[in-house]
Amino acid sequence: GVLARVEEWREGLEEGKSLHYYPSGKLKKEGYYVNGMYEGEWLVYNEKGIVIQKGSYINGEPEGEWQFCYDKGQLSEVLHFQDGKKEGPTTTYDTKGKIIYTGLYKNDQKYGVWNLYDKKGRLTTKSYTP
């Protein structure tokens, strides 16, 4: 068999450090559980060992800044969460680090001004969401 996960359990719930593995045996995801819920920082890796997602949880819900990356590790998106919902500024990048778009989320919905940029970094489109 292939090791898929290493977890600690207490009273029928995941508790403590958790490690998830790809079928190849390489680390896929790591973080902590408290009372069966994600808690604190979690990291997700691709099969090359590069972090492709980094974010924190409070009581099983995403919270604060989350970063998503392309397979080679370049930042692709930064999102913010509050109480498990997208909240606040977000920025998406291309593989060369140039901004593709910026915007805001409010209560998990696009809100306000969203800006789209071309490959040279020039603002091409501005849209507004109620």
Image (cartoon, rainbow, N blue to C red):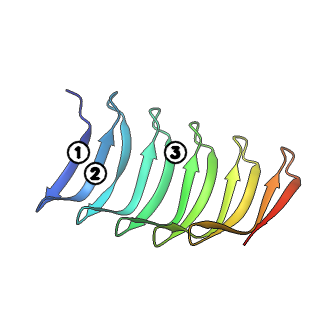
SS category of the residue bearing label 3:
strand
Along the viewing direction, whichever of 99 and 113 lies nearer the viewer: 113
At 68% from the left edge and 53% from the top edge, which residue is drawn? 92
Three-letter residue code for mark 2: Ser
Three-letter residue code for mark 3: Ile
| Mark 2 surroundings within 10 Å by alpha-carbon count, few (fewer than 14), some (14 through 19), many (20 or more) | some
SS category of the residue bearing label 2:
strand
Q: Position of residue 128 (x, y in %)?
A: 78, 67
Residues tagged 1 and 2 counted as in contact (Cβ below 8 A): yes
Q: Position of residue 106 (x, y in %)?
A: 61, 72
Q: Position of residue 65 (x, y in %)?
A: 54, 64
Does residue 52 sit above or below 54 in this rendering?
Answer: above
Q: Alpha-carbon distance for marks 1 and 2?
A: 6 Å
Q: Position of residue 57 (x, y in %)?
A: 40, 65
At 65% from the left edge and 62% from the top edge, which residue is drawn? 90
At 41% from the left edge and 60% from the top edge, which residue is drawn? 41
- Quarter of the image with the C terminus is bottom right
- Horizontal side, residue 48 vs residue 14: left or right: right
- Which residue corresponds to mark 2? 18
Q: Quadrant of residue 60?
A: bottom left
Q: Alpha-carbon distance for marks 3 and 1?
A: 20 Å
- Which residue corresponds to mark 1? 6
Does residue 74 sit above or below 85 in this rendering?
Answer: above
Name which of mark 1 and mark 2 comes first in the sequence. 1
Q: Alpha-carbon distance for marks 3 and 2?
A: 17 Å
| Mark 1 surroundings within 10 Å by alpha-carbon count, few (fewer than 14), some (14 through 19), many (20 or more) | few
